[in-house]
Amino acid sequence: MTQDSLFTERELDRIIEMAWEDRTPFEAIQFQFGLTEKDVIKLMRRHLKRTSFNLWRKRVNSGVSQKHLKKRNPEISRFKCSRQKAISGNKISKR
């Protein structure tokens, strides 16, 4: 049984979406879904094409991305944008 089977398709889509977002730190994914950075990397490797995965890893490690809290401005203390829709009823709101 893989860790992927613990999540619904919608949750997997959201994890991948959060991983692609530059300003969403790995700690937010861990807080919301219980996946460590290592787990997210494994999940992305399984669900993305090889070239897409390589582009994602390059971007995460490039310094442009703020995927690690220690790279972020210390004045930013939230996990999501103040303009983002709220999560209601424990369901993930999509755009």
Image (cartoon, rainbow, N blue to C red):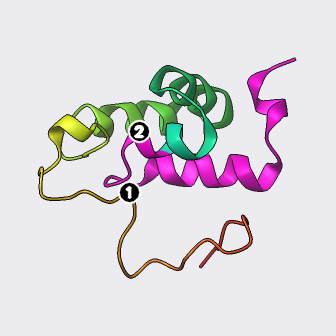
Give the camera-side residue of 18 and 30: 30
User: Are there few (<14), some (14-19), or many (20+) residues within 10 Å of tag 2?
Assistant: some
Return the x and y of residue 88 as percentages of the image width and height: 67, 75
Return the x and y of residue 10 as percentages of the image width and height: 76, 56
Disc sitting over residue 79 in the figure: 1
Q: Residue at x 28, y 37 (%)?
A: 68
Which residue type carries mark 2? Answer: Glu
For marks 2 and 1, give the CA distance: 9 Å
Give the camera-side residue of 78 and 2: 78
In the picture of the structure, the residue carrying the numbered disc 2 is 27
Which residue type carries mark 1? Answer: Phe
**Segment tinted magenta in the rendering:** 1-28
Q: Is-magenta flag for residue 27?
A: yes
* Image quadrant in which the N terminus is located: top right
Horizontal placement of 14 versus 8: left or right?
A: left
Q: Residue at x 58, y 22 (%)?
A: 42
